Amino acid sequence: MENTKKEGKGIDRRVFIKGTAAGAVGLAAAGLTVKPWTAEAAEIPKKWDSTYDVVIIGSGFAGLAAAYEAKKAGASVVVLEKMRTLGGNSIINGGVVSAAGSPKEEQEGIKDSPELLLKDMLAAGLHLNHMELAKMVAYKSNETVQWTINELGVKYKSRLTQEGGHSVPRMYSTFNSSGSAIVQQQLLKLKEIGVVPEKRCLLTQIYRDKDGRVKGVQIREKYVFPNANSGKIKTIKAQKAVVIASGGFGNDVAFRMIQDPRLTGDYQSTNQPGATAEALREAFRIGCTPLQLSWIQLGPWTSPDEKGMGVGPSFAGGCTMYGLWIDTKTGKRFVNELADRKIRADAIINSGNKCISFTDAHGYAIFQHFLGEAMMLKMIERGVVKKYDTLEQMATANDCPLEPLKETIDKFNRSVLAGKDEEWGRYLQKDQKPLGAGPYYVSRLSPKVHHTMGGVNINAKAQALDVMTDKPIAGLYAAGEVTGGVHGAVRLGSCATIDCLIFGRIAGQNAAIEKSWS
């Protein structure tokens, strides 16, 4: 560090603390006075290349929701996406979204409430969730899903499903089992009101002035991922606000290893290649508060027989309801298949990664009806799902002891007939049947980095909070996976989509009514 003064044997405390967010947090916790923001970055441009009321970084669920609401409120809007494809992780996600107390639940006779969803979120999150944020997700879940139907025109399948950690089935699934069904409708609605996101625009700097207000951004236009020096520098003035909706950092091996050294490059990620931390680092540089960055979720249902997210999770997820997960070393169940993601991923890793999910002909027929025949055939053609005519063939192919496997199935079947899973306490579906004769369908399990729970600290208005004062940074909002606090230690499946949509909309609405600084 340059220009430091000696204080005894150490560097000058004022200079050191000024340069580290951690130091600021430490001083605040100790009750010592901390100074408000003083600009360390380059000067605010005297001339901008372009000007908008609201500048949005990222084109996933959150960024597009923010753009839609801001434009509807009368603001001029630009959406900047660093990749050559729009949608980020959102466009490749599984297309599931939770709604507590929805009309579909009532139709299916499922008793649910926002309070129960909140309880499930807090249990999975180890109560590290920031309550005001988690409550927003739980209590606005149903109205937001209905908004995607009634205003965006998103189409969902007729039946609700259930993910691990949820007490009851409450998940709406898009007609194509992909987040693209939501993203494409968001893009269509934006186009109708005159907003077309700009691709290949890398955020390189957020301009925060000496008065503490964010006033615009610097980007590299025509950026070519991952070449950080590609493209032309351009400045964009944000007369009202900047919204950071850049997503998580699941594919940024260097940054995620700083938070959790175990997550080396040996772990694959389900994320798209651009899920990296540049925008998050820049947010911290200008004074945002880092929150819970080391809580990184691994998807327990991914397959080592394909790269990235792939198609396997839909099958393994189905087996949590209409099949079993088995440790092939023992032939026994090793976890509640509907436990939260961290519990299941940890259980697979602790078992030595020798685990499979499987279902019988009845389960396969349900998957085929729900996911479509083409999707099921794709899983088999890719070798992600394998078919065996007999249990003996399945056991032999997966080096699994046959007799313990038979005992495990018999024990589960007795639980189904009794209406209660005595061994692991799994929720049993209303149409649950004992596992029958073959053929059997199997996928291997191997966890991959999936979601980063931590990020920028925000309040219920989606305002980014200052690390020195804990007060909102004027002109700066954040939404989606780039933020922290909503999910605590573990995110429940289907709650990321609703989180992104809710806080994206809030960020856009509030950014649009910010007072212009010029």
Image: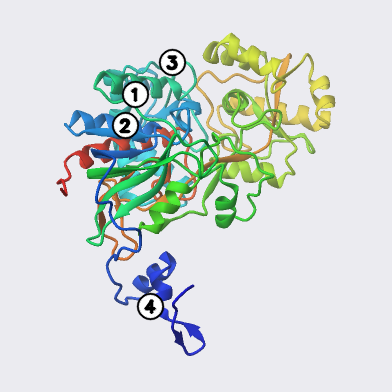
Q: Quadrant of residue 15?
A: bottom left
Q: Which mark is residue 14?
A: 4
Mark 3 crowd level (few <14, some 14–19, many ≥20, 10 Å Cα): some
Instruction: First in sequence, mark 4 or 1: give its number.
Output: 4
Q: Nearer the viewer, mark 4 or mark 1?
A: 4
Q: Which mark is residue 186?
A: 1
What residue lies at 49% left-to-right and 72% top-to-bottom?
Answer: 1
Identify the secondary structure beneath mark 4: helix
* Label pair 1/2, CB-CB below 8 angstroms: yes
- Spatial distance from mark 4 to mark 3, Cα to Cα? 58 Å
- Spatial distance from mark 4 to mark 2, Cα to Cα? 41 Å
| Residue lying at the far bottom of the rendered structure | 8
Instruction: First in sequence, mark 4 or 3: give its number.
Output: 4
What residue lies at 44% left-to-right and 40% top-to-bottom?
Answer: 247
Residue assigned mark 3: 157
Mark 4 crowd level (few <14, some 14–19, many ≥20, 10 Å Cα): few
Above or below: residue 9 compared with residue 500: below
Residue 356 place in picture, x, y as percent: 71, 31
- Spatial distance from mark 1 to mark 3, Cα to Cα? 19 Å
Above or below: residue 374 compared with residue 223: above
- Which amino acid lies under the numbered mark 2 shown in the image of this protein? Ala
Q: Nearer the viewer, mark 4 or mark 2?
A: 4
Image coloring type: rainbow
